[in-house]
Image: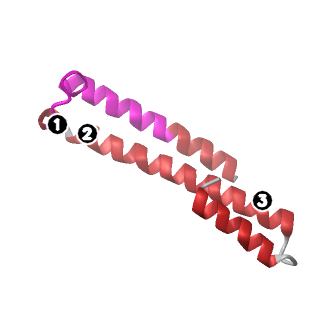
Amino acid sequence: MTIDELITWCEEEEQSHRMKCKRADDASGYTRSKDKNIRTAVAIREEVYGDFYKQTADTMRKYQKIEEIVGNYGFDTAWLCLKKIREVLEDGE
């Protein structure tokens, strides 16, 4: 599996879990009332899973950028490469 395929898969999984969360919130009445006392464990679990897949996709995008930096600059200019990697890790861009 390539990094692009992994990112796509994580995005699809995130969307699936978000839909399951919304479905559970709609069924319990939480969507209308926003009363946390009636929110179900299923909705909370699906929200956590959605967050997990979003975070994984974001991390893979950072890894992809780091891989691109190393490919563009190589190890001969390690200081410049490390500077660019630091920017990715700090800014997320």
Looking at the image, residue 30 sits to the left or right of residue 10; the answer is left
Report crowding for label 2: few under 14, some 14 to 19, many 20 or more residues within 10 A (C-alpha).
some
Q: Nearer the viewer, mark 1 or mark 2?
A: 1
| Residue at the spot 26% in from the left edge and 23% down from the top edge | 26
Camera sees residue 68: yes
Which residue type carries mark 1?
Answer: Lys
Look at the image and say whether residue 70 sits in the magenta stretch: no
Report crowding for label 3: few under 14, some 14 to 19, many 20 or more residues within 10 A (C-alpha).
few
Which residue type carries mark 3?
Answer: Glu
Q: Nearer the viewer, mark 3 or mark 2?
A: 3
Q: Earlier in the sequence, mark 1 or mark 2?
A: 1
Looking at the image, residue 80 sits to the left or right of residue 34; the answer is right
- Disc 2 secondary structure class: helix
> Which numbered circle lies on residue 56?
none
| Residue at the spot 15% in from the left edge and 31% down from the top edge | 35
Figure check: 32 above or below 81: above
Q: Which residue is mark 2?
A: 42
| Residue at the spot 48% in from the left edge and 48% down from the top edge | 53
Q: Which residue is mark 1?
A: 36
Q: Quadrant of residue 29?
A: top left
Looking at the image, residue 31 sits to the left or right of residue 59; the answer is left
**Closer to us: 55 or 24:** 55
| Residue at the spot 57% in from the left edge and 43% down from the top edge | 9
Q: Earlier in the sequence, mark 1 or mark 3?
A: 1
Give the magenta range: 13-36
Which residue type carries mark 2?
Answer: Val
Q: Earlier in the sequence, mark 3 or mark 2?
A: 2
Q: Residue furthest right?
A: 76
C-alpha separation, residue under disc 1 versus residue under disc 3: 44 Å
